[in-house]
Amino acid sequence: MAKNKVENQGMIRRVYQRIILLGMLVHVLYIALGGWLTMTEMVFYNVGSTVFYLTMLVLVFYGRYRLAVALIHLEVCVFVVVGTHALGWETGLPLLLIAMASLIYICPYRHSTVPFLFSLLEIGVFAFLKLTSDQEIWLPQALPGSLVNGIYLFNAAMCFTIILVSSSIFNVSSALAQGRLRRKNKELQEAAFMDRLTGTLTRYGLQEQLRTSQGKWMAVALGDLDDFKQVNDTYGHICGDYVLATTARLMRETESALVCRWGGEEFLILMADLPQAEAERKLATLAEKIRSYPFSYDGHLIRVTMTFGLTYGRIGADFEAVVELADQRMYQGKRQGKDRIVF
């Protein structure tokens, strides 16, 4: 899971880096244009913007995506206003605002409404520039018609490029979301199949395992930890969890056995296609392993034993009846003094 998280972070970082590099390219080209037109102010402004995007690369490297995205939206608005003032509406700079307004897919924010607010800002700036473009507050430099058309086509190309990049970002975001969904489904499936504390099968997990074992002859043992409530009351529930997890580990080490946490401190152990004497021997060995294991908690040595009820049957529609019989024998062992196997 940690590896997937690192890979996702790397993919996200690369997406933002491409956006920033695209912004840097635009400003570098405008530095060249300003130098060609001997517009010193434009050159200095775009040099500052290039430095700004270098700073954004640093922010993205450290995972400050929200701040970087917010500042980039604001920078584009300022750049379009300044550029339109210098070059005129006809050069198509406001088209960049339309492209930026399409980047609602980029949402590193806690609230999904934030990108829409940026889009509304850019639409508002676009409308303001259009409504005021013919007024005397704008004093653009007179440029040849062919140059105006060239700048317009360049800005239109940048606009389409930004939209295409936003589409690729959407695809990446969708892939990441699908990956998160698959991992979540896997986690939920594992939680349904495996008991987190003990690492044994849940009842549902056992049912799924037994779907391919219909008709097989199995030894079915139901075991219960003796005096487990006393362990919890004396040493606390953390100690109780330790005893459960350790006991489950000892049971899982039994060769050719399925182990299921049946409920609380009860465990179901299934051994397929074993002679009766062999199944009884394995269960006796397990009981002795638990009995002799040095359970130690907070400096206290705890003696742990289990009582088992053992029966035999075929996996099928009457499986619950087989388990019920093992349960009856287990409780018979409890009445007879615990720490024993009844079969």
Image (cartoon, rainbow, N blue to C red):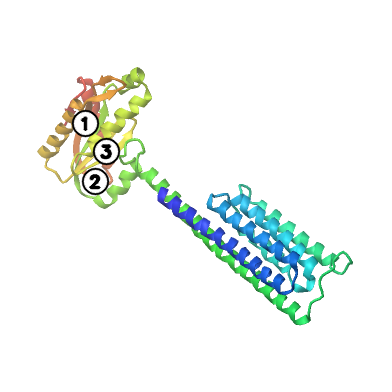
Which of pointers 3 and 2 indicates the residue nearer the eye? 2
Do the residues under discs 2 and 1 have CB atoms within 8 angstroms? no
- Say which element carries label 2: loop
- Identify the mark nearer the N-term, 2 or 1: 1
The percent coordinates of residue 76 (x first, y second) are 70, 60
The residue closer to the viewer here, 23 or 185, is 23
Q: Amino acid at mark 2?
A: Ile
* The residue positioned farthest toward the right in the image shown: 136
Query: Which mark is on residue 150?
Result: none
Q: Total of numbered circles in the picture?
A: 3
The residue closer to the viewer here, 318 or 112, is 112
Locate the C terminus by quadrant.
Answer: top left
Crowd band around label 3 with a 10 angstrom C-alpha radius: few (<14), some (14–19), many (20+): few
Say which quarter of the image contains residue 322.
top left
- Identify the mark nearer the N-term, 1 or 3: 1
Q: Residue beneath label 3, please?
A: 321
The percent coordinates of residue 85 (x first, y second) are 80, 66
The percent coordinates of residue 37 (x first, y second) are 74, 74
Query: Which mark is on residue 309?
Result: 1
- In the image, 87: left or right of 206? right
Q: Residue beneath label 2, please?
A: 315
- Identify the mark nearer the N-term, 3 or 2: 2
Q: How many angstroms separate mark 1 from mark 3 (CA)?
A: 13 Å
Q: Amino acid at mark 1?
A: Gly
- Say which element carries label 3: helix
